[in-house]
Image (cartoon, grey):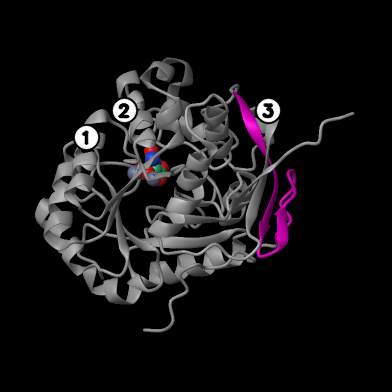
């Protein structure tokens, strides 16, 4: 008798931190290719960051991105508005209804949206409508600077890609204080450390950088004790040619490897399956106030094992920092509103069939 394969069904997975590229960076990835990668990774929906040129910091750029992603997306989606160095707060009331949140870059990274002046950060915090969240790139002591703004304004704030023990300690205390903050960590900070940089070279280069084993252990502790709310891929494709340049741009793809890495960790007893579902589906949906659509599910075979290889990826950039790793848990099917959009091999959804989760409308 052959054993009956048992599958797991995860409802409506949401990655709240991706850089799909497209627009002027379509050579790195397109809305079509990277939302296809999202489906192949098991995701129902993704929330796209504003730092791809032309940066999503004014209403014409917002319209252009909404139109382009609307034409191409094969999974559901939302986009962030960006805080710009030039004061763009006048656009906030009109933009807020049409986006999932405001992104503020408080430390240097890809793009030109860095805001280092605390008074300017405060102006952006003051102007953004309270009904939508703020997401921040903040590293090290900058986390404390942003917490001061959260304390002063009461603005709900999501801390992206937290990567050190020091940052975890600050956010653990902020949560104990009752501040309305949530915490995201990435698979690369959970599964790689600075020890991997020598072998990975530029493919191990991202912001925040890979950290020490002690920092990595602090992230896993914070997954265990609930300080971490979500695992977000920070999917940020660059071409291999760009990664071969000096200096190489920062950023790594992650949409297709996050779920198998977490399921492998679950198999090894590092976290429960229920906790994986919280981290990639339930908590991200709750943070952004999104209900799972009916019959929207990712079917996974937890007993199927694969080696991560660039040839099997859908992302246009065609590489992964996790290449060569054996992982457990294969996505067999993704359904959105009852339709099979990924069958385990091929994306079956038509371009433009993905829905905007923040369509705006009623004032
Ligand atoms: C991201 C990118 O390339 O857009 N890069 C990265 O290293 N994470 C930007 C970001 O998330 O800060
Ligand atoms: Zn960032
Ligand atoms: Zn990012």
Q: Is residue 342 magenta?
A: yes
Res 306 → quadrant: top right
Is 192 positioned to the left or the right of 140 in the image? right
Precedes in sequence: disc 1 or disc 2: 1
User: Would you name the residue on which mark 1 appears?
Assistant: 169
Q: Position of residue 6 (x, y in %)?
A: 73, 39
Query: What stretch of residues is rendered in magenta?
Result: 326-349
Q: Secondary structure at mark 3?
A: strand
Marks 1,2: beta carbons within 8 A: yes
Q: Residue at x 34, y 48 (%)?
A: 111
**Extreme residue toward the front, this view:** 1
Q: Secondary structure at mark 1?
A: helix
Calculate the distance from the C-alpha at mark 1 to the C-alpha at mark 3: 36 Å
Is 333 positioned to the left or the right of 240 in the image? right
Whereabouts is ligand 3, in terms of quadrant? top left
Which of the two marks, 2 or 3, is nearer to us in this view?
A: 2
Label annotation for residue 218 = 2
Q: Residue at x 41, y 72 (%)?
A: 98
Q: Is residue 278 magenta?
A: no
Q: Position of residue 97 (x, y in %)?
A: 37, 74
Q: Position of residue 117 (x, y in %)?
A: 12, 50
């Amino acid at each position: 008798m052959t054993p009956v394969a048992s599958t797991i069904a995860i409802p409506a997975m949401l990655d709240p931190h991706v850089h799909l590229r497209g627009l002027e960076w379509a050579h790195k990835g397109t809305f079509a290719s990277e939302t296809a990668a999202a489906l192949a990774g098991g995701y129902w929906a993704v929330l796209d960051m504003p730092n791809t040129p032309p940066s999503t910091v004014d209403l014409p750029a917002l319209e252009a991105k909404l139109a382009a992603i609307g034409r191409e997306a094969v999974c559901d989606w939302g986009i962030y508005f960006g805080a710009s160095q030039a004061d763009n707060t006048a656009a906030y009331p009109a933009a807020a209804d049409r986006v999932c949140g405001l992104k503020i870059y408080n430390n240097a990274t890809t793009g030109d949206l860095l805001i280092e002046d605390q008074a300017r950060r405060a102006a952006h915090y003051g102007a953004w409508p309270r009904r939508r969240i703020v997401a921040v790139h903040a590293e090290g002591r900058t986390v404390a600077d942003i917490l001061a703004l959260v304390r002063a304004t009461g603005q709900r704030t999501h801390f992206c890609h937290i990567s050190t023990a020091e940052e975890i300690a600050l956010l653990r205390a902020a949560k104990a204080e009752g501040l309305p903050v949530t915490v995201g960590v990435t698979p690369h900070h959970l599964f790689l450390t600075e020890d991997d940089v020598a072998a990975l070279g530029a493919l191990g280069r991202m912001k925040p950088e890979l950290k020490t084993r002690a920092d990595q252990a602090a992230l896993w502790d914070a997954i265990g004790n609930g300080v971490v709310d979500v695992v977000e891929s920070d999917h940020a494709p660059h071409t291999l040619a760009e990664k071969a340049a000096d200096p190489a741009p920062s950023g790594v793809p992650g949409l297709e490897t996050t779920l198998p890495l977490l399921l492998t960790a679950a198999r090894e007893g590092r976290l429960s399956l229920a906790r994986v579902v919280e981290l990639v589906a339930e908590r991200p949906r709750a943070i952004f106030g999104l209900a799972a659509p009916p019959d929207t599910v990712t079917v996974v075979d937890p007993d199927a094992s694969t080696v991560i290889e660039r040839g099997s990826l859908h992302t246009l950039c065609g590489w992964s920092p996790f290449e060569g790793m054996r992982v457990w848990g294969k996505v067999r099917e993704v359904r959105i509103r009852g339709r099979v959009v990924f069958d385990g091999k091929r994306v079956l959804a038509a371009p433009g069939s993905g829905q905007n989760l923040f369509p705006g409308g009623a004032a």
